[in-house]
Image (spheres, grey):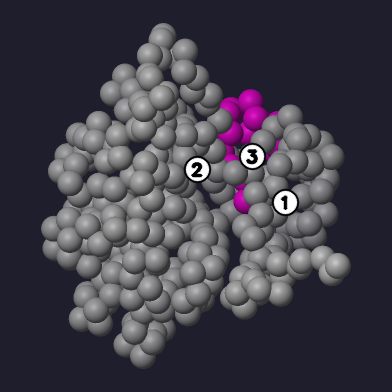
Amino acid sequence: MNKFNPAFIVRENIKKLSPYQAKEIPCKIKLDANESPFPIKLSDFISEVNIPLNRYPDPEALKLRKALAKKMKISYTNIMIGNGSDELIYYLILTFGGPVLYPIPTFAMYGIIAQSVGVKKFESKLDSDFDINEEEMINLIKTEKPRLIFISSPNNPTGNTFSTDKILKIIDTARKNPSIVVIDEAYQPFCSDRGFLPFLKDFDNLAILRTLSKIGLAGLRVGYLIGNENLLSEANKVRLPYNVDVLTQYIATAALSKFYAQIKNFITEIVKERIRLQKELSKIKGVTVFPSEANFILFKVKNSQNVYTKLIKSGILIRDMSSTIKNALRVTVGTKEENKEFLKVLNNILGG
């Protein structure tokens, strides 16, 4: 009997798809995944969790949505919760379809999910300053008629924010198309700008993605979509039932209500360390540092893959971005001690 081979019936768009690689390489100092370096444990703010696990979670995640709404001073009806931003990106593309448009380099999941769902994707290269190519983006909106436009600001992996004026022009052009512009603000807590939340009242085709992952709760996988009720109502049609489990809802709500002051202190410390790390990196010969408004820094060195490998051998894991940006590496801002060790080892590798 011939063995069954599932490859024979895999959809063509999946055959051509490369999965997102989240590599786990054991190292004593982990600065590769844009996580907070400050551990938050249940015991920090919850002495006892008394939740009956024989019941399904609240399908609407009402308490968590209200806790988030209180922090942002908006209505909970303008919030939808997902298992990380990835799930919400998937729901948006599943709901509204394609084409999908986004600038590159950026978060890989926009393209991966678009391809997995089977919709067309269009990419616009950032300019030499890693800002949006406004003319090209607007031309693509007019000619290709994308239904969804994803813009990550601050952007991953470049770390910079995009020009607000350029984004507003894109949103305005998209509204006439019509298409939805989704601003991914995963790194907004570390940014000096307020982000695009104030513009929601002006543009009904604007939605915002945020997450609790970068500020210390990555293990919970909580992302949230902010937008007008009509938009969320459509996306809610494809949301899987009980998509956020009961423990995640409880812990995230408790963290926001009981532990948020400490989380804000962690954010302040990360921003302070980012500024210091940028200055120290720029002093190392052979290193080109790019401005960052996120919790990571992009920099270039010659023979970046060799430097990356030597860092791992020294017990320090960062992210090799050379396949996306030539000779580029990305380092997450760690604790003061972790950053100090990283700088010391990098300096030694580069012969400083």
Relative depth, front residue between 144 and 53? 53
Rendered position, 198 above or below 346? below
Left or right of residue 283, residue 124 in this image? left
Give, as a three-letter code, the residue at label 2.
Asn
Q: Say which residue label 1 marks.
A: 285
Label whose residue precedes the other's in the sequence (2 or 3): 3
Secondary structure, mark 3, is loop
Labels 1, 3: front one: 3
Which residues are drawn in magenta?
A: 330-343
- Mark nearer the N terminus (1 vs 3): 3
Which of discs 2 and 1 lies nearer the camera? The answer is 2
317 relative position to 119: left or right: right
Q: Residue furthest front?
A: 1
- Asked if residue 194 can be seen in this view, the reply is no
Report which residue position mark 2 lands on.
295
Label 3 sits on residue: 31
